[in-house]
Amino acid sequence: MQAGEGGRDAFVGVLEAEHRLSKGVEGANWARSLTSTANGRVCFDQGRSNGYGGLVEKCVLHFDGEKPYETTYVNPISHLVAFQLNGSADELAGARCEWTFGSREVEPFTGPCDARFSRRIPRKIDRADGSRVIAPTGVSVKISRAGAEDRVVGSEVAVRDLMIVGMGDSIASGEGNPDRPVQLSQKGFCFRRFLTGGADDFNRPSRAGVSETGIARACPPDDEPTGDPIAEREAWDATGADWLWRRCHRSMFGYQMRSALAVAIRNRHASVTYVPLGCSGAEIRAGVLDIQDAREKKRRRGWSDGGTVDSQRNVISQLLNIGSRRNRVREVDAVLLTIGANDVGFSGLVADVLLDPAAKERGVMGSTIVEPATARKAIVDKLRSDFVELRAFLHLVVGPDLSKVVYTAYANPALKGIDASGRPVACGSGRQGVDVHPAFSVDGTKLAETAKFVDGEFIPALETLATCRKVSGSPVPVNCDDAEKDRMTFVAEHRAAFATHGFCATAASDPAFDRDCFRASGDSFDDTNQSKPLRCDRDPDAFRTYAERTRWIRTPNDAYFAAMTYPFRRSKAQQPSDLHAGLWGVLTGVYGGAIHPTAEGHAAMADAVVPKLEGVLNLGR
């Protein structure tokens, strides 16, 4: 008997699947129907501010052809299994089969022997010897054929239920790839420049529906009070992009989600329970080990969902009762992890390259702007020591062997090709793809220095810390207590593919909207035109967030057209005072998903992760 069909031989790869799915919806969002708790597809609740990080402890799921059922997400009470009797068409023709199961909870099935059917098999845990082993369910089939003696065959079903936990920062969460992109309007929305007295106000495409909410699209006069009225914020929030979990910008398109999904699809005789915890902005301490700022927060009259997110350590500890070996809910089979960029000031490095030296906004960003020398010091002074505490926590999650932790390296986002000598070529100076804010202009010299730092020092440092092996170029030594037990599984094979797909990479095959509307000259917008700030003759809502394109890294323009994020900042100096405030556009460009992988980029990362993840899980052997 078999419990499924298809599997790894039928799987085309995550990137190829992304291309097929995207073409099927003409570059729109194929995952939209999967991300609402109300439709019974996922156990997530957008309204949960903390608790289990958006996970619903119990939820009602319903799939095609099946009655709705309530389940405990992290410890499922049953699994849907497909059954079919093995044999050739000639052997099974004309025969009838009576299927019975060793559990009264499973309904028998009678029908043609070549029929394929599904039953939900209870998940029984055998604790007799103190361990947690899934107990098998017996299956018996009586085969009847006219003129022949009945024959009975039997077997057992023991579903292998794998738990995969995703942890880390914005790369882990899928930042820049909302499950439902924002809808933009042809009409403009006014933003102030910082400390210019209204002389340099500029317009960019507004969120669709803003005018109908009563929010003024024009900038108010400087002598009018600003502030952040709750009624305006409530209306503003209603017009934004949707995420699997908005507070962390957690997305179905992230590489961790796609890797876990691919493992489930490729291995049809196994079940995968995936727990996504990655959160945009997370560092090792502020994020994984302790609370962090939310990427966005909602406000309602008399209520706010707060400005922090519970630590990933606390969430997984509560979900699984980590710390109690006997009463632990279940074991973790693998952890997917990407962390470290925010610890050395990733967004500050982006701001350093993007913000024009003469722009007053650069001065407001202050110490948050980071140069490679500062990031290098953070590797030595902070990242190295924080990794020690991170390893100690991960041992509590997966046990003594950290090879169950699959650490995936960051791609270099700033490369556009390979030269004649085989060396990567970095993006240069210019405003193409970054002119969504007047203060943005890529400094090619700074970018080349930053790209060299990323490839020559930052990635080697991460590999050294993750693998307990000194890698050439790393500014830190190995600091593992036990290299064999502390060594993580390291994934970097995808980095070569990104060498021709950086944020500035373009081709004639790119979407027509990109070619027509994001101008190489850096003048894609008419700052003073509030009725139509986008110069090209296309509707802003025609931008296709998930269309196939050469760049696998979101530009600031992409990030704006995909999400138009209103990022939350706890620092009062950096929190916009109202919807038109001068710093808003800068924060959108720096913290709103720019210089993060697109869905294609995440899919390419997943293709590199899946083989190593399956190796950790002992699948396909």
Image (tube, grey):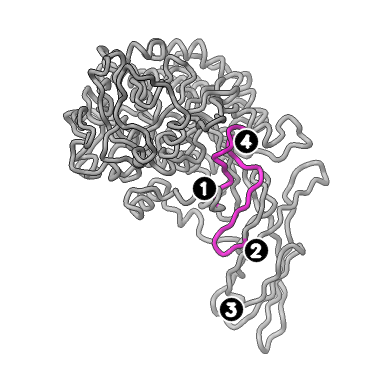
Residue 2 sits inside the magenta stretch: no
Of circles 4 and 2, which is in front? Answer: 4
Question: The residue under label 4 is which amino acid type?
Answer: Tyr
Question: The residue under label 2 is which amino acid type?
Answer: Arg
Q: Which residue is mark 3?
A: 91
Q: Which residue is mark 1?
A: 36
Q: Is residue 542 shown to the viewer in this render?
A: yes
Compared to residue 117, the image places residue 45 above or below, namely above
Q: Which residue is mark 2?
A: 119
Residue located farthest toward the right when viewing the structure as drawn? 128
**Region rendered in magenta:** 41-67
Contact, mark 4 vs mark 3 (Cβ under 8 Å): no
Give the SS element for disc 3: helix
- Label ID, residue 52: 4
Compared to residue 376, the image places residue 600 above or below, namely below
In the image, 225 versus 295, the foreground residue is 225
| Residue at position x 70%, y 32% in the image | 322
Give the SS element for disc 1: loop
Q: Badge 2, how many Cα within 10 Å: few under 14, some, many 20+?
A: some
Residue 62 sits inside the magenta stretch: yes
